[in-house]
Image (tube, rainbow, N blue to C red):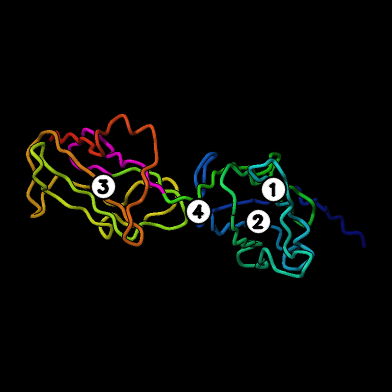
Amino acid sequence: MQLPFSVYPDDQNPLLDVTFNGDHILNGDIIDPNSEIYITLKDDNEYLVMNSDADTSQFGIYLTDPTGQQTRIPFVDGNGNTIMQWIPANNQNMRFKIIWPAAFEKDGTYTLFVQGSDKTGNLSGDIEYRVSFEIIRESTITNMMNYPNPFSTSTRFVFTLTGSEEPDDIIIQIMTVTGRVVREITEDELGPIQIGRNITDYAWDGTDEFGDPLANGVYLYTVKAKINGEDIKRRESGADQFFEKSFGKMYLLR
């Protein structure tokens, strides 16, 4: 008996994903000096599941530091210390996972390069994952811009934070042009804050402390931010031109 059959090669590229502290970053972003870098490679071949120590050799992870020196990041260093942990794929999620608790000790711009392949040798893409990011170890905060501005229904606050600690005390004071404080927004209201770019979950709706709508017009606001009781240094940014003596203007137009 003869039974013809066909064999098709595995030529599908696996999918690579890289996050920093759970977020996808853009070139030039400022990140936390102590960041958890999470790398996953998803391959749909159920017969060649990446689930062994040998599969770590399918990855090339390189870091270029601010001096231009490139280093390959190992899973285990020469002294036997674990640098990156890995979690095997299984038939349910098909994702090989790498966890790298990175600590960047120098200020400046770094470049991360990641390439991976499946057991057949298919690369994760024709172009490797590459991203540049900035480390600033000093704690600073930019002036907060409200966006949109002018606004009619609500406005959020946009700012950049550097260093390795989030503020433990933030207050945004909104006042009339005569200096009367009509609303104070606390850190608890703003929502999660992270090192790098921030846009608050909280959106101010133009109401006062009692929830009553404020009249249309110009309002001033200022921000007080502290870590361990000390004011955070202001960082220069393109938003500074819209502030005078740390006071910004917002326009409420319903």
Q: Secondary structure at mark 2?
A: strand
Q: Which residues are magenta?
A: 140-156
Mark toward the viewer: 3 or 4: 3
Residue 243: quadrant of the picture: top left
Discs 1, 2 touching: Cβ within 8 Å: yes
Q: Secondary structure at mark 1?
A: loop
Q: Which residue is mark 2?
A: 41
On whether residue 6 falls in the magenta region, the answer is no
- Observer-nearest of 206 and 15: 206
On whether residue 143 falls in the magenta region, the answer is yes
Amino acid type, mark 3? Val
**For marks 3 and 4 on the same chain, the one whose residue lies earlier in the sequence:** 4
**For marks 1 and 4 on the same chain, the one whose residue lies earlier in the sequence:** 4
Measured in 3D between alpha carbons, the distance from the residue under mark 1 to the one under mark 2, in whole angstroms, is: 8 Å
Amino acid type, mark 4? Asp
Q: Secondary structure at mark 4?
A: loop
Task: Name the residue at 42% across, 54% down.
Answer: 194
**For marks 1 and 2 on the same chain, the one whose residue lies earlier in the sequence:** 2
Q: Which mark is residue 124?
A: 1
Please tell me how crowded label 4 is: few (under 14), some (14-19), or many (20+) other residues with Cα within 10 Å: many
